[in-house]
Amino acid sequence: MTLEHAYQRAVTALRQADALLVAAGAGMGVDSGLPDFRGPQGFWRAHPAYAHLGLQFVQLANPRWFRSDPALAWGFYGYRRNLYRRTQPHSGFAILRRWARELPRGAFVFTSNVDGHFQAAGFGEDAVFEVHGSLEWQQCLAGCGIGHFPAEATDVDVDMETMRARPPLPACPRCQGLARPNVLMFSDGGWIDTRSAAQESRFQAWLGGVEKLAIIECGAGEAVPTIRRGCEALAGYLPQATLIRINPHDADVPAGHVSLPLAAQAALEELDLRRSAR
């Protein structure tokens, strides 16, 4: 299929849909200016301090550091949260939000990103399923029973030379013990998933009223394939669903669906122009 044909099929699906599923992985944020962590070298280029320590992303995204070295753990997650808060979502988010307002059944977001950018771009909290949680929420490391709670509005103070957090570190408002992000990490048996589970229930209820679904998947790679697999399962299960996969690196799709091997912002802007043309 040529790129022109792919655009035509995508626009047809968008015009015929009564609902939009916006699915996003880490690549969605690259056009907003967030680092591309593809492979250890990409992560180390963004964070040279971790290269000196020989620590990769997968090693750092592990809850054990909150017990053995909380300053290192909050340096990693605090820096990311600070960065996400300073970064403005790119124009593609607004395009998706506008499309959602024009559809009878609106849109739902299905994302592995923990940056809170869909809410920042105007998507309602009740229409977002953050399958891996969010850095804008925290939980008590000691498990005092508070469950999940909003993160403080203030940033974590991180030494950019060492990537270690300076005290005071985020604390539980009930017991004053150390807090950790309410996100799913690697080898994480302590994640409190009640917020994500409630989001999933709302997502499933929304899907029950959808007839013709357009799935726009942006920047969901194969390294952590949660979003890709979820979208492919939906596209195979729902008879009137079309998957439009936007990805400059991993754009292959199941037969009958649409591949756009482009960055998210550029593809969404072009689709918007074509969708509005008559």
Image: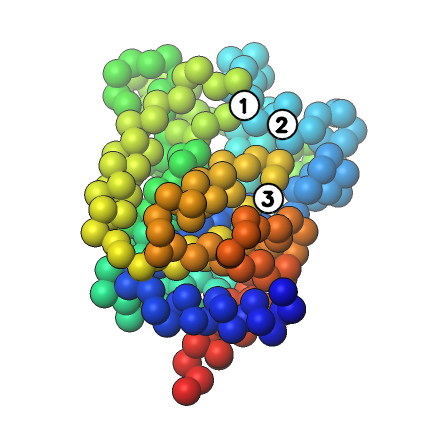
- Packing grade of label 3 (10 A; few <14, some 14-19, many >=20) is many
Q: Which residue is mark 1?
A: 186
**SS at mark 2 in the image:** helix
Q: Which residue is situated farthest in the bottom direction here?
A: 278
Q: Amino acid at mark 1?
A: Phe
Point out residue 29 in the picture as x, y percentages from the top left corner: 54, 53
Colour treatment of the image? rainbow
Which residue in the protein does label 2 denote? 58
Foreground pick, 71 / 214: 214
Between residue 24 and residue 261, name the one nearer to us.
261
The answer to whether one can see residue 129 in this image is yes
N-term-proximal mark, 2 vs 3: 2
Placement of 173 over or under 269, stated as above or below: above
Q: Can you tell which quarter of the image residue 21 is in? A: bottom left
Q: Earlier in the sequence, mark 1 or mark 3?
A: 1
Residue 35 image position (x, y, % from top left): 64, 48
Q: Quadrant of residue 132?
A: top left
What residue lies at 65% left-to-right and 39% top-to-bottom? Answer: 160
What whole-number distance in Å separates the C-alpha atoms at marks 1 and 3?
17 Å
Mark 3 highlights which residue? Answer: 221
Q: Is residue 135 left or right of residue 157?
A: left
Q: Is residue 244 left or right of residue 128?
A: right
Disc 1: CA contacts within 10 A as few (<14), some (14-19) or many (>=20):
few
Task: Classify mark 3: helix, strand or loop.
Answer: loop
| Residue 173 against residue 106 in the figure, above or below | above
Residue type indicated by callout 2: Val
User: Which numbered tag is attached to residue 210?
Assistant: none
The residues bearing labels 2 and 3 have C-alpha atoms spaced at a distance of 15 Å
Which residue appears at 48% of the width and 67% of the height? Answer: 10
